[in-house]
Amino acid sequence: GMVNRYRAHTQEICGLKWSPEGNYIASGGNDNKLVVYSSKANTELVKFHEHKAAVKAIGWCPSSPSLLASGGGTADRHIRFFSTQSLNQSHCIDTGTLSFI
C-alpha cells in the first residue's frame, strides 16, 4: 500500500476518521484544528479553526457524505458541523447549555 507522511497538525493528532466513500480523511488535533485531507487529490482540502479545544470526536454523515461533525474538548464544549462542499462551518451546538436527564 501507499503511505504518505501526514503533516497537517502542529501537535498530536487525537481523532481520525475516513469518510464513508474513502475520499477524505478528517483529523482532529491537540492544536484545536480539524483538517480534511483529500486522498484522491493527495492534498489538504481544508483546515477548520473554529474549535477552542482539542478535536477528539469526528463523525461523517452517512446520508450526506459532504457533512462531518466534530466535538471539541471542555474548553470548547461545541459540536460543530462542517461541509466539504462549502468549506465552512454549517452549524454548531453548544453542549454547555444542554441538560441531560
Image: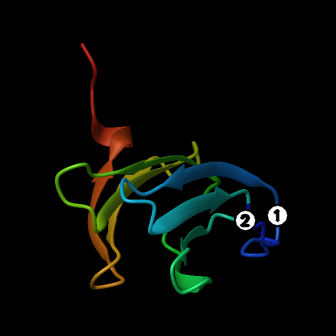
Q: Residue furthest left?
A: 63
Q: CA distance from mark 1 to mark 2?
A: 5 Å
Question: Residue 26: percent from the left, percent from the top?
Answer: 53, 62
Q: Residue furthest front?
A: 1
Q: Tell me which residue sits at (57%, 42%) in the image.
A: 74
Q: Are marks 1 and 2 in contact (CB under 8 Å)?
A: yes
Residue 20: mark in rendering: none
Please indicate whether residue 49 sits to the left or right of residue 3 in the image: left
Q: Nearer the viewer, residue 48 or 1?
A: 1
Q: Is residue 14 above or below residue 98?
A: below
Judge the density around disc 2: few (<14), some (14-19), many (≥20) Cα neighbours within 10 Å: some
The kind of residue on which mark 1 rests is Gln
The kind of residue on which mark 2 rests is Asp
Here the colouring is: rainbow
Question: Residue 88: percent from the left, percent from the top?
Answer: 34, 81
SS category of the residue bearing label 1: loop
Of callouts 1 and 2, the N-terminal one: 1
Q: Tell me which residue sits at (19%, 60%) in the image.
A: 64
Q: Tell me which residue sits at (61%, 83%) in the image.
A: 42
Please state, as top left, top right, bottom left or bottom right, where the C terminus lies in the image.
Answer: top left
The residue that label 1 is drawn on is 11
Please indicate whether residue 54 sits to the left or right of residue 101 in the image: right
Q: Residue furthest top?
A: 101
Please indicate whether residue 14 sits to the left or right of residue 72 in the image: right
Q: Tell me which residue sits at (60%, 51%) in the image.
A: 16
The residue that label 2 is drawn on is 31
Question: Residue 27: percent from the left, percent from the top?
Answer: 60, 60
Q: Nearer the viewer, residue 17 or 42?
A: 42
SS category of the residue bearing label 2: loop
Question: Residue 54: percent from the left, percent from the top?
Answer: 65, 54
